[in-house]
Image (cartoon, grey):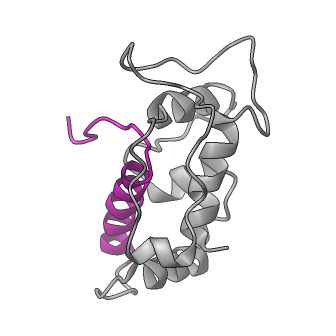
């Protein structure tokens, strides 16, 4: 499975009540019309979808609420809204430079991989967009 697939899969596992899910304290929703845990969530992204995502339109998943809830459960709070490293950590991924470079290759990054700051910013934007493309609801994080 691709790195992007693992990130999105970790979020969707949580939406389905998977690892670490706490049903007594559901993730908040940003919009009353949003479904926090769909009955049929989209499948995890595979490597082919990383370059040509297939939007999921039947239902959306309140990814922002899920990630906020996951972050609330941690002792060390993570800034997943702007940091690819923190987003990867929050979803249980290895956030090492090697993993981020592999993710950058997977997503078609054409910049200088030795400029990790620029690469990280690009990666975060791409991953957030891919989550949205696959049915994840996250408000514009530039607000």
* Nearer-the-camera pick, 137 or 142: 137
For residue 69, side relative to residue 126 (left or right):
right
Which percent across, then down, holds residue 126? 35, 63
For residue 59, side relative to residue 12 (left or right):
left
Please provide the residue range marked out in magenta: 116-143
Question: On the rendered image, what quadrant is the N terminus found in?
Answer: bottom right
* Residue ID at (34%, 81%): 115
* Residue ID at (51%, 17%): 28
In the image, farthest residue toward the front: 58
Which percent across, then down, holds residue 106? 48, 81
* Nearer-the-camera pick, 74 or 10: 10
* Vertical relation: 49 (above or below) 111: above
Dominant SS in magenta: helix
Which percent across, then down, holds residue 68? 52, 29
* Residue ID at (37%, 54%): 133
Which quarter of the figure has residue 17? top right
Q: Is residue 130 magenta?
A: yes
């Amino acid at each position: 499975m691709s790195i992007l697939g693992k990130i999105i899969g970790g979020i969707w596992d949580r939406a389905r009540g998977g690892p670490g899910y706490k049903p007594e304290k559901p993730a908040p929703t940003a919009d009353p019309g949003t479904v926090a845990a769909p009955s049929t969530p989209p499948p995890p992204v595979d490597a082919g979808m990383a370059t040509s995502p297939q939007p999921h339109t039947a239902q959306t998943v309140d990814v922002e609420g899920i990630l906020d809830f996951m972050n609330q459960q941690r002792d060390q709070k993570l800034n997943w809204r702007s940091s690819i490293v923190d987003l990867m950590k929050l979803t249980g991924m290895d956030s090492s430079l090697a993993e981020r470079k592999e993710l950058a290759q997977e997503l078609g990054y054409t910049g200088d991989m030795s400029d990790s700051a620029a690469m990280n910013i690009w990666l975060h934007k791409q991953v957030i967009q891919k989550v949205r493309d696959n049915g994840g609801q996250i408000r514009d994080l530039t607000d």
